[in-house]
Image (cartoon, helix red, strand yellow):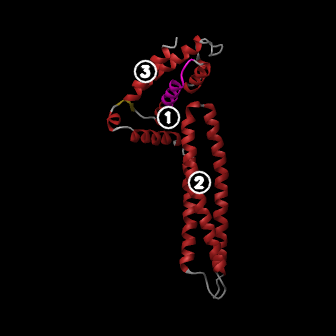
């Protein structure tokens, strides 16, 4: 019985799967550098960048194990295949199945990392997780995103006023170069103007604001609006 076709088929399969994943990882490195560049340009993407990296790492881990298993099974078929008898059908079926699964999983990962709406989807998932962690009464308390952003702008204005008062802004009198809430809170903390607790609260509020903004959601947690209002009052009392 001529079983050369089995030898060449699964030898090529192992090479194709490994080469495909190697090219995929190269493309992922390029996409990751673009994501990091976008984060450096826009500080509000900091939290989403961490969420995306964690998600990509989890999927790459699964893909790496799938690829290793697919290649090992294909090579096992090649090793077990003989001129007088071919490899067991169950082994060839398993190797072929894992080859296909590895390629499909790789293509799915490619579609995910090049998705132009990846930031929005990541923000939506993170917001949904936060809502699931809240108490039922808090989840039902909702308000419009516009109301939340109005309250948050007051917080940003209060932070900039404190930075100007302490001469921590720079040369621009309008305070536009004060940076994000994360940067302004860090400046006030380094100056000793705010406590660690208030700094942590400002970071949490800034993270929620970024998730709502990049998630393009229309509703926000009413409890977060109250927290923003209280934080604004604390910042204004610094003066």
Q: Is residue 80 left or right of residue 228?
A: right
Q: Which residues are magenta?
A: 193-207
Q: CA distance from mark 1 to mark 3?
A: 24 Å
Can residue 131 be seen from the camera position used here?
yes
User: Which residue, given by chain and number where applicable, does mark 1 sit on?
Assistant: 214
Is residue 205 one of those drawn in magenta?
yes
Q: Identify the residue shown where x is 64% and y is 54%.
A: 24
| Residue 187 position by quadrant | top right
Q: Nearer the viewer, mark 2 or mark 3?
A: 3
Looking at the picture, does residue 61 appear above or below residue 217?
below
Determine which residue is flagged by label 3. Answer: 230
* Disc number for residue 18: none
Task: Identify the image quadrant of residue 168.
Answer: top right
Q: Is residue 33 magenta?
A: no
x, y percent for residue 116: 54, 42
Number of marks in the rendered image: 3
Give the percent coordinates (x, y) of residue 62: 56, 57
Can you tell which mark lies on residue 60? 2
Q: Residue at x 63, y 74 (%)?
A: 76
Q: Position of residue 189 (x, y in %)?
A: 58, 22
């Amino acid at each position: 019985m001529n079983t050369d076709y089995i030898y060449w088929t699964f030898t090529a399969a192992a090479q194709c799967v490994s080469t495909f994943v190697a090219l995929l990882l190269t493309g992922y490195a390029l996409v990751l550098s673009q994501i990091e560049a976008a984060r450096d340009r826009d500080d509000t993407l900091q939290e989403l960048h961490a969420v995306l990296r964690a998600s990509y790492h989890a999927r790459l881990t699964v893909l790496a194990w799938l690829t290793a298993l697919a290649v090992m099974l294909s090579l096992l078929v090649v090793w077990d295949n003989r001129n007088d008898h071919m490899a067991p059908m169950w082994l060839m079926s398993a190797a072929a199945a894992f080859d296909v699964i590895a390629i499909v999983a790789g293509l799915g990962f490619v579609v995910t990392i090049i998705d132009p709406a990846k930031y929005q989807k990541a923000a939506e998932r993170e917001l949904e997780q936060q809502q699931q962690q809240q108490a039922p009464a808090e989840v039902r308390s909702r308000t419009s995103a516009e109301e939340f952003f109005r309250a948050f702008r007051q917080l940003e204005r209060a932070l900039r006023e404190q930075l100007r008062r302490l001469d921590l802004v720079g040369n621009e009198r309008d305070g536009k170069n004060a940076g994000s809430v994360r940067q302004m809170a860090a400046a006030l903390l380094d100056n000793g103007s705010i406590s660690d607790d208030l700094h942590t609260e400002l970071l949490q509020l800034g993270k929620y604001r970024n998730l709502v903004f990049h998630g393009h959601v229309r509703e926000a947690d009413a409890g977060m609006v109250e927290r923003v209002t209280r934080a604004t009052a604390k910042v204004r009392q610094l003066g």
